[in-house]
Amino acid sequence: MFPQYDVIVVGAGHAGCEAAAAAANMGSKTLLVTMNMNTIAQMSCNPAMGGVAKGQIVREIDALGGQSGIVSDKTMIQFRMLNRSKGPAMWSPRCQSDRMRFAEEWRMTLERTKNVDFWQDTVREIIVKDGRVVGIKTNLGVEILGKTVVLTNGTFLNGLIHIGEKNFGGGRVGEKSTTGITEQLIELGFESGRMKTGTPPRVDGRSLDYTRMEEQPGDENPSQFSYTNTPKLTNQRSCWITYTNEDVHAVLRTGFDKSPMFTGRIKGLGPRYCPSVEDKINRFADKDRHQIFVEPEGWETVEVYVNGFSTSLPEDIQYKAMRLIPGFENARMFRPGYAIEYDYFPPTQLKLTLETHLIKNLFFAGQINGTTGYEEAACQGLMAGINAHQNAQEKEAFVLKRSEAYIGVLIDDLVNKGTDEPYRMFTSRAEYRTLLRQDNADIRLTEKGYGIGLADATRLERVQQKISNAQQIVEQLRTTKVSPDAVNGYLEQKGMATLREKQSLQQFLKRPDIEMQQIKEMSEAFSQFLQPFDEESIEQAVINVKYESYIEKERLMVEKMTKLEDLAIIGSFDYDRVSALSFEGRQKLKKLRPQTLGQASRISGVSPSDVSVLLVYLGR
């Protein structure tokens, strides 16, 4: 009935979709197996893509030739570039998505992809012979052979949903959990654990009073995730912000004795940086309010996502407390929030390609590796799909270094450090974030994507043109001089420091109070020179000039940290006396007791600033 496939992908969430698309676009005959064809690329939690560090990952996926950025651009209802007030290393694209259209567009993308076949069924075991995977077996008893298998099971492995004192099996509300795979993998010698995540209630947007909330509109000139010519967003929907209060907290506390998190019924650890509302109230008892982001789920639907109100308390407590939030006085709930526990496999059991050590040609990607977030899952799926194809075609493995991409940071963290709580990407996890910006992901990665046959020639030509354009602009800035007589009148009018002698525009642009727009206003000739260039190339040139010394400093830091790899830390080192360490960093260092600074730097939760602080103390 079935041919032998090069790559079989189990699960059609964000990881599975990217894995299948990547393998197929590189030329592998690919099968995508999902329990439900109608929930391909389902946004199980918030209807959004990107955010701090996550947006950088989406741009990296796109730069390599993945699909998440394109799908996001085609289905977004709002776009914002976060952290614009900070340096470009912190700029992070984020979009609000149309949940239904996002899933539909992903399915259509896969259906249009040559080499992708589909099969709706549940996989109950993998077929292993002589230490390598050779296929899968489904609940229907169907055996399908494949050279490689990628498991992207999400929260479905022995998934258990909790709402108050009730619990029932499921990978998502309304969908069955998967059994058999965990048990088989344990028999094969794998170590497994349990993790927990949660989701908030959904409500009827027609029942909310937005006059009592703060509007959060999109950017005036919205950008995109993809470096391709995806459609520009011309119309946007606003999100809204409101806050909990002491009355809300008081009602929520009445349900704490029925909370599965507090009574011990939930054994798995939840996301540290995305806690439930009851956890926030408990952990931050000194706070009298917490932010609630009110997010529309699409262009046409009235359903609204209550971001910040994730909970597993009894549904009647959720409803009563939610109605005390300003703007929610008459809210009608579509469905309550819930928590879900599921199996994961500590990712220290993987190679940097995401292939398992124990079973050849078996790959894990997404929440099965202990991560949380669509973007984290998607980039793992992309890398697993690439390497499954490489294995099937007997080609060289494809690995990204920490200094090359956030994707490299994430996978290196998982494989070398492991995680005992849901792993989420932050800019602070990357030592070289000045180099790993969202604006230069194409410059860093598109040639690599082209080299393995994933990014096409059009993408490569586009990035080469961008590099050339930026170089031309920088050269023009270097050779064009401005005199005090030409610009001091303008500077005095704007209240800026004046020039004393001639200066190149390159040096002039490095002033913190000068941007390219002001240079264009001061120099008509330079403004005319810039006319043929696109905004992306101009922005790249500006960043290269203004942050040249920071970029060079970071390159030197790479060399310096390499030399510090073997610097020893005595076993009795007292981390409690180092007040400058972050709280999480101190916790992890005390628990794991690294022997060297290099080892300490790779512990999940120990930031680059923590490493710098340790270096100072070790020097003393």
Image (cartoon, helix red, strand yellow):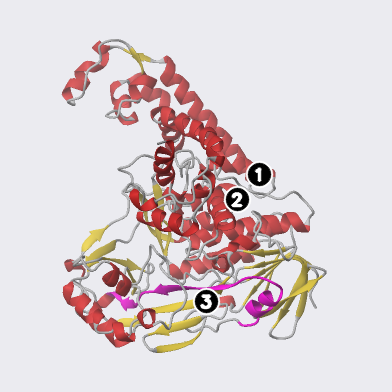
Precedes in sequence: disc 1 or disc 3: 3
Q: Residue 363: x, y in percent?
A: 67, 63
Residue at 17% x, 21% y: name it.
492
Give the magenta-colored segment's residue range. Answer: 179-205
192 in the magenta segment: yes
Badge 2 element: loop
* Amino acid under disc 2: Gly
The reply to whether dot 1 and dot 3 touch (C-beta < 8 Å) is no
333 in the magenta segment: no
Relative to the observer, which residue lies in front, 130 or 245? 130
Alpha carbons under labels 1 and 2: distance apart = 8 Å
Precedes in sequence: disc 2 or disc 3: 2
Residue at 46% x, 78% y: name it.
267
Residue at 77% x, 59% y: name it.
392
> Is 477 left or right of 120, judged from the image as shown?
left
Q: Which residue is mark 1?
A: 450
124, above or below 386, in the image: below
Q: Quadrant of the N terminus?
A: bottom right
Residue at 40% x, 64% y: name it.
272
* Amino acid under disc 1: Tyr
Disc number for residue 295: none
Disc number for residue 65: 2
> Is 421 left or right of 205, judged from the image as shown?
right
Q: Residue 574: x, y in percent?
A: 40, 51
546, above or below 477, in the image: below
Q: Which residue is mark 3?
A: 342
